[in-house]
């Protein structure tokens, strides 16, 4: 093996406000050894940048917080380099929470065991066919339950999850309206992802545009960003409207709890429902979603946009891109050639 060093980013301190390089510590350590029965050594190839990592390094969420001094938790795809398990062969591609590091030793069974990667290009396996594709699929269809003819509005629409939500909504016969930051992203939504309408929240009056575009109000609001946009959407909810609480990236860097949504009584007046979900709860049904998404991607009904940065040393900077809206679709970081 050419590279015998494991380069790693450890958590040095919990961020206060936006992520800074000083929140992390770069170390170079000897290669870890798979021990005992059933451990495997994985060479990370691509890391996934996800807004939820901001929560993982701050506090206990749906997973325990990363401890100070631990490697920063991150989704990844890697190649099996050594295996003491009959389940995984050397050379196979696997995905899991392998962290911001070149190499990870992981158990072959039980919690933390990797999943096999479908035989498609790695970026596609980590975007439309990966966790963000699954998030859009189950969040929209299971939690949002759209019906043909419904108006579906999604925030963070040009991002990894949001772009899939609008496209699945369109496939299901709904009107898909996206809210995104900037003219270029809105043009991409209309031209490439074939949304019915797009609103640039940075330069337009979102409330006025929603009133104009949704004369029958919003049947499903898929919320990726929280904050003031959630309030604006609540005010336009249709009778029996559903709000899918997927994420709230607009508030993840806040140092104090954000104010509650002012317009929450719209849920009462309209007999609405606002429901959160975590995609990890749907992993048993992942094959159903992957099959459907693979069909839509192969037939061209769904376009997949991936933004690949390079170099493990750029992990903190790559994560920050999500919060500045610099990512164009699913944000990945390539750290080694497949
Ligand atoms: N519940 C679950 O199981 C689950 C799973 C995966 C992801 N999520 C959540 O889904 C959301 C999207 O995640 P993703 O991985 O698909 O990321 P993404 O949408 O590809 O990237 C994040 C986007 O958020 C937007 N953004 C950043 N700050 C914002 C602000 N202050 N106001 C409005 N928009 C802002 C930016 O787009 P603009 O340029 O348009 O501002 C940025 O491109 C996140 O909230 C994430 O936590 C939840």
Image: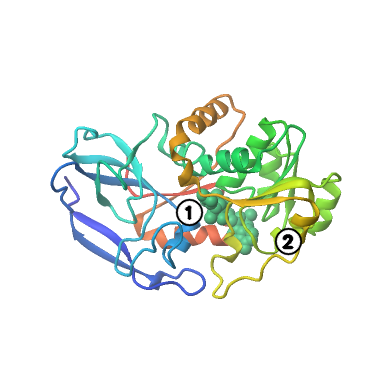
Residue 210, given in percent of the width and then of the height, sits at: 80, 51
Residue occupied by mark 1: 50
Tell me if residue 51 comes above or below residue 88 in the rendering: below
Question: Can residue 327 be spotted in the picture?
Answer: no
Q: Measuring 42% from the left and 30% from the top, which residue is drawn there?
A: 120
For disc 2, the marked residue is 264
131 or 101, nearer to the observer: 131
Q: Is mark 1 within 8 Å of ligand 1?
A: yes
Do the residues bearing badges 2 and 1 touch, measured as CB atoms within 8 Å? no
Name the residue rendered at 55%, 49% in the picture: 277
Instruction: Look at the image and tell me in which quarter the N terminus lies.
Output: top left
Residue drawn at 37 percent across, 35 percent down: 117
Q: Residues within 10 Å of mark 1 (few under 14, many from 20)?
A: many
Position of residue 173 in the picture relative to residue 245 (left or right): right
> Where residue 180 appears, x then y in whole percent?
67, 52
Disc 2 secondary structure class? loop
């Amino acid at each position: 093996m050419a590279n015998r060093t494991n380069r790693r980013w450890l958590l040095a301190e919990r961020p206060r406000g936006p992520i800074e390089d000083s929140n992390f510590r770069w170390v170079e350590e000897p290669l870890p050894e798979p021990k005992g029965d059933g451990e495997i050594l994985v060479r990370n190839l691509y890391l996934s940048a996800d807004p939820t990592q901001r929560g993982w390094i701050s506090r206990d969420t749906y997973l325990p917080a990363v401890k100070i001094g631990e490697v920063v938790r991150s989704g990844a795809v890697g190649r099996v380099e050594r295996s003491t398990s009959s389940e995984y062969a050397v050379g196979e591609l696997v995905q899991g929470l392998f962290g911001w590091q070149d190499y990870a030793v992981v158990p072959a069974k039980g919690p933390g065991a990797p999943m096999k990667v479908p035989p498609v290009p790695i970026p596609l396996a980590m975007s439309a066919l990966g966790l963000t594709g699954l998030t859009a699929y189950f969040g929209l269809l299971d939690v949002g339950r759209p019906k043909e003819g419904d108006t579906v509005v999604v925030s963070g629409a040009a991002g990894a999850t949001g772009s899939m939500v609008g496209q699945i909504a369109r496939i299901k016969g709904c009107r898909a309206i996206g809210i995104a930051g900037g003219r270029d992203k809105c043009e991409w939504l209309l031209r490439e992802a074939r949304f019915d309408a797009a609103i640039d929240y940075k330069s337009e009056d979102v409330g006025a545009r929603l009133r104009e575009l949704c004369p029958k109000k919003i049947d499903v609001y898929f919320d990726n960003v929280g904050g003031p946009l959630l309030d604006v959407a609540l005010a336009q909810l249709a009778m029996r409207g559903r709000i899918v609480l997927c994420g709230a990236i607009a508030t993840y860097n806040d140092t104090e709890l954000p104010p509650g949504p002012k317009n929450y009584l719209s849920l009462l007046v309209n007999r609405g429902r606002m429901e959160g979900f975590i995609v990890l709860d749907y992993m048993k049904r992942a094959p159903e979603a992957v099959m459907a998404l693979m069909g839509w991607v192969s037939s061209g009904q769904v376009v997949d946009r991936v933004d690949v940065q390079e170099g493990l040393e750029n992990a903190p900077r790559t994560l920050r891109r999500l919060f500045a809206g610099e990512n164009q679709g699913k944000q990945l970081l390539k750290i080694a050639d497949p």
